[in-house]
Amino acid sequence: MDSSQFDEASSDARRNRPVLIYDGDCGFCQRSVAWLRRMVGERVEYEPSQRVAGEFPQIPPERFAHAVQLVERDGSVSQAAEAIFRVLASVWWWRWLLALYRAVPGFAPLSEAGYRFIARHRGSLPGESGACSIGGPPSFLATRWVFLRLLGLTYLIAFASLGSQIVGLVGKGGILPGERYLSAAGDYFGSERYSSVPTVFWWNCSDATLTGVCHAGVAISVLLILDIAPALSLVALFALYLSLTHIGQVFLHFQWDILLLETGFFAIWIAPLSLRPRFRTAAPPSRLAIWGLRLLTFKLMWCSGVVKLTSGDPTWRDLTAMSYHYLTQPIPNPLSWFVYQQPMWLSKASVVLMFAIELVVPFLIFFGRRARIVAFAGLMLLQIMIGATGNYGFFNLLSVALCVTLLDDAALPRFISRRFAPATPRGWRWPAIVVWPITLALITTSAVPIIECFDRNPPLPGWAERWYARASGVWHLVGGYGLFRVMTTTRPEIIVEGSDDGVTWKTYAFKYKPGDLHRRPPLIGFHMPRLDWQMWFAALGDYRSRHDQWFVAFGRRLLAGAPDVLTLLGENPFPSAPPRYLRAMRYDYHFTTPAERSASGDWWSRTPIGLYCPILSRPAGVN
């Protein structure tokens, strides 16, 4: 076949398939096209513009230098992010991206902005190796060391914070006694009780055991921070926190509790097996396990952005959500009041920035080392903004730890990375035959919560549904994340009051949640006040719902004067004897304006809504 025959055959082939035209002189573009080819195969023809630009006179030559071009079989042309999404949509499991691009307001311009940013900086976005990479082949010894220290600190804070509350929450005299919960679970699950509710408290659920497990968690966290038996420490920490998550019932089912367990389980497989690993000679972590943590970071951030758009909440779509957020978040801090006063244009700008970080920046994780440094900076900025304007316990610290896995040793500060200069590894690490099946199974299962961002009940085979139910609902190895899917636009608060005669009512003060109008919003730090958080959820719900039935049990404990429950509160207005009656009034709380605060000194104003639930009373003759 001569050259003219070859050209004619090629032209015929292109007429039967779409043609993706890219810059053949750009190494980054070549690697991106190679990735696309792996994703969709030969459903699309891939051609460098330097070779075929003349065959498509309908495309101005300068467009080839700025973006990829996709020529469909009918001659229609798309470019940039849209072209990429159309190529991926040739495989059915990628079609959700094109659907987002077409249907979700704001997604298309954000995608195109992200594409333009990457295109302008593609010369500084190399792959994992090659002449343009940073400092040669990547190493993750220092990265692992920093990540495990931050994770150990997060575990320590989580156990210590919970240890000060656990007895009042689920102790024998607590709001939801753990012994009663395990008894009901045992009756329901029968012989499968241990595998359906995996917790060490099956053998002993006394108050001393509850606090002892928290203290043990603190001690083992210190061992992890000191780099003593890190793999064994991580296994123990996961087992203990999983046990507390189950026994804690509604008080430990927050998204960051699940995130800590998912992160902690992944971390087991990057930890060295040595009892006392040395900085320079520790066995390097598995690359696949590192990527598992990176994908978890992607899932956390990207899903949090997607669910805001797919929820249909109008405040996210019209960019007004942040004008409510600082007021209506669970526990505002002092800065929340000040930021709430900002003009609407600045609130809308912060929503656009948030969407850019949550929807676009996570994709940089897949575009090489310098791109991941940019992603790290963007995601860190988001965590700083969240932590500065609200009280979210250890969530921000845990998210920062995950972001660190986006970096390799060369990207860390010199004073850290120089301690891990290459040396001959002498320690032990998990064998690939263990790490690969576990990590791949978790990564694959994580696709389910990503799909659920678009379809809350995706069709799955029966075996897949059962596996996902156990992995997510029982062992908490895989979580679905979607922070503030729907923005609350008002702030109802429950004020709990007691009375001896049904006429004069005295208020129970909580430690952190809004109550006294004159009290400044608190700055809590990393502590997670579980009762105060649940009071926020209860105010938005109904005491008769399954999730909020704990509130009546809480009221009964106050009427009984339960000392362990009273320690969870800030002030007990009945120090001598519990009241005869208890009521829960619901109010609509607002931040005061600067003028109102200057005049009265109040941070809050409120208007009554009515009773949250019927008035509770202590039976006659009960002291």
Image (cartoon, rainbow, N blue to C red):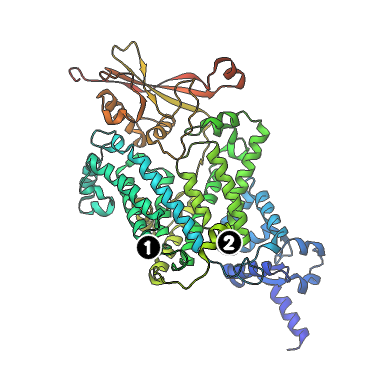
**Position of the N terminus by quadrant:** bottom right
Q: Going 27% across and 28% down the picture, which residue do you hit? A: 563
- Residue 148 appears at what percent x and percent y? 44, 56
Q: Which mark is residue 388?
A: none
* Residue bearing the label numbered 2: 366
Q: Secondary structure at mark 2?
A: helix
Mark 1 or 2: the one toward you: 1
Dot 1 amino acid type: Arg
Decide if residue 182 is on the left or right side of residue 26.
Answer: left
Vertical relation: 107 (above or below) 575: below
Q: Secondary structure at mark 1?
A: loop
Q: Going 28% across and 52% down the picture, which residue do you hit? A: 196
Vertical relation: 109 (above or below) 56: above
Crowd band around label 2 with a 10 angstrom C-alpha radius: few (<14), some (14–19), many (20+): some
Crowd band around label 1 with a 10 angstrom C-alpha radius: few (<14), some (14–19), many (20+): some
* Residue bearing the label numbered 1: 276
- Residue 210 appears at what percent x and percent y? 27, 43
Q: Please say if the residues under marks 1 and 2 sit with CB atoms less than 8 Å apart.
A: no
- Residue 83 appears at what percent x and percent y? 68, 60
Q: Work out whether mark 1 precedes mark 2 in sequence or the reverse, and give the earlier one.
A: 1
**Position of the C terminus by quadrant:** top left
CA distance separating discs 1 and 2? 33 Å
